[in-house]
Image: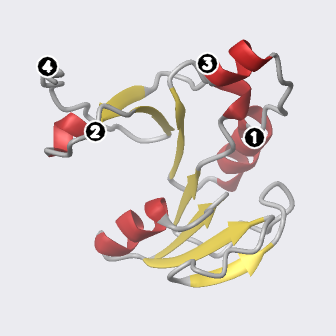
Amino acid sequence: MRALDLFCCGGGAGMGLHNAGLEVTGVDINPQPKYPFKFIQADALEFDVTGYDFIWASPPCQAFTRAKKLQGNQHQDLIEPIRRILVSSGKPFCIENVVGAPLINPIMLCGTMFNLKTYRHRIFESNFKIVQPSHPPHTN
């Protein structure tokens, strides 16, 4: 199966897709010389998503972070435009972003759910059912 990793950056999500057995192609508007799989430098909002079996999108999160609110910066919201593309593709997809982003019926995942030593929370929207694991308590 072929997976598309939009807004791929360095390849964290792409590695997860690869570990799940998918053939991964990453797309990012910026060069990603260390991306570990096939890489295409392009605008994710203009990239032809046909020909892929699964699409992952991690649009920039700056518009929804607490730091944005503290610093008073303005950042473009790319979630709605990428959602329209993903829905119209008819393919299974997942959108990942920070807590507070306008995802539809998201689940929240935390590193502790996977025995990682991080409390970083991320939310995920998909057009298929994802079951949220139990959330262990955070400890110091």
Disc 3 to disc 1: CB gap under 8 Å: no
CA–CA distance between discs 3 and 1?
Answer: 26 Å
- From the viewer's perspective, is the residue at label 4 or at label 1 nearer? 4
Identify which residue is drawn at 25% across, 34% down.
131
Instruction: Give the residue pinned by disc 4.
Output: 137
CA–CA distance between discs 2 and 1?
Answer: 32 Å
Q: Residues within 10 Å of mark 4 (few under 14, many from 20)?
A: few
Relative to the observer, which residue lies in front, 125 or 59? 59
Identify which residue is drawn at 53% across, 30% down.
98
Q: Residues within 10 Å of mark 2 (few under 14, many from 20)?
A: few
- From the viewer's perspective, is the residue at label 3 or at label 1 nearer? 3
Residue 118: which numbered mark, if any?
Answer: 2
User: Which label's residue is closer to the chain start, 3 or 4?
Assistant: 3
Whether residue 108 sits left or right of residue 78 in the image: it is: left
Q: At label 2, which amino acid type do we have?
A: Thr
Instruction: Give the residue pinned by disc 3.
Output: 66
Identify which residue is drawn at 58% across, 68% down.
4
**Residue 65: percent from left, percent from top:** 62, 24
User: Which label's residue is closer to the chain start, 3 or 2?
Assistant: 3
**Residue 135: percent from left, percent from top:** 18, 24
CA–CA distance between discs 4 and 1?
Answer: 36 Å
CA–CA distance between discs 3 and 4?
Answer: 22 Å
Relative to the observer, which residue lies in front, 22 or 15? 15
Indicate whether 11 appears above or below 112.
below
User: Which label's residue is closer to the chain start, 4 or 1?
Assistant: 1
Identify which residue is drawn at 45% across, 62% down.
12
Indicate whether 3 appears above or below 111.
below
Disc 4 to disc 1: CB gap under 8 Å: no
Q: At label 1, which amino acid type do we have?
A: Arg
Relative to the observer, which residue lies in front, 90 or 7? 7
Q: Residues within 10 Å of mark 1 (few under 14, many from 20)?
A: few
Element under disc 1: helix
